[in-house]
Image: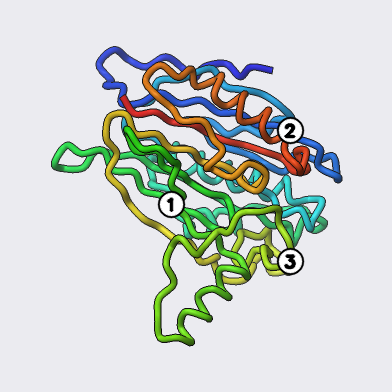
Amino acid sequence: MTFPPNSSMPNTVKVVAQACAITFQGNASNQLQQDAFFFLDHWYQEDSGVMSITSVALPFCLAVSDGVASSNYSQHCSKAVVKAVKSLWDDKEKPTSDKIHHLLNQANHSVKRHGAAATIAMVVGELSSDGIIKATITHVGDSRVYLLSKGAALWQCLTRDHNLLNELIDEQARAKGQQADFADYNREGMAGSLYSITECFAISADESGLSSEAPESTVRTIEMKSGDCLVICTDGIHDLVPSDEWQLVSEETHLQDWLIALKDQVYDSEGNAYDNGTAILVRFD
């Protein structure tokens, strides 16, 4: 299916980027779509589809959430996460991990869904006081954000997964009195036990309606320039197709075609799309 474009923008609104998204259930063994995403003004959770290419104005918000597959109800947690993002965005509040966690706790979830968990990777774009486009990147778990700077030859991962492997890397570096290099994190390859997530959102797990404390999120802000590109994606993308195998993006690149080619790479990979996959591609004008 093809999702409809977002509502038209007034001519007075300055467009700063073009964006497109793709999502697919893949060959997930549980036959569930546990990914969900928020795209500018609405949330989606579909078995398969590609967005129309959409103009992006400031401020904007884009996010993906991946239900942790250990629970067959985690599709409800990922949906709850992106619905919380929409609620905050509609109220003109900048979404944060703590605010999303608070809204999850306020909702009346079915008992059978308690313990369902999900990740998030989110980008909020704003114009700074000095006229520069700033992208605030927030993530929890192993959904990621990648940057392709204009003219660069490789995509750069901007997020450090919250998983056991990266914690082990940090512990080994501390034992040596050092700090781990970012390049040591997020080692490529299909997920194993060391890839177990250490931080995630969870639907309330007790009768009081209160879950444990909010997950630890990582937040960073970068400056975006004309020609720069971002990809926000779930692990069903980056686990199976490392970013050094992704195509580059130029001014001539058709965003829909790029995402469809990435989906084809996921299905052609050794893992044969064993997980759900969702990716949002943004190219700044």
Residue marked by disc 1: 158
Distance from label 1 to label 2 (Cα)? 25 Å
In this view, 68 is above or below 261: below
Q: Amino acid at mark 1?
A: Leu
Q: Amino acid at mark 2?
A: Tyr
N-terminal label among 3 and 2: 3
Residue placed most toward the observer, 217 or 8: 217
Residue marked by disc 2: 267
Element class at badge 2: helix
In this view, 208 is above or below 271: below
Residue placed most toward the observer, 34 or 89: 34
Element class at badge 1: loop
User: The C terminus lies in which quarter of the figure?
Assistant: top left
Packing grade of label 3 (10 A; few <14, some 14-19, many >=20) is few
Q: Given this view, does label 1 or label 2 mark the residue nearer the observer?
A: 2
The residue positioned 58% from the left and 59% from the top of the image is 187
Can you give x and y, in whole percent of width and height, for residue 280 in the image?
A: 52, 33
Packing grade of label 1 (10 A; few <14, some 14-19, many >=20) is some
Residue marked by disc 3: 193
CB-based contact (under 8 Å), mark 1 and mark 3: no
Residue placed most toward the observer, 139 or 237: 237
Q: Amino acid at mark 3?
A: Ser
- Colouring convention used in this rendered image of the protein: rainbow
- Residue 243 lies in what quarter of the image? top right
User: Relative to 78, is 247 on the left or the right?
Assistant: left
Can you give x and y, in whole percent of width and height, for residue 223 in the image?
A: 27, 44
Residue placed most toward the observer, 27 or 39: 27
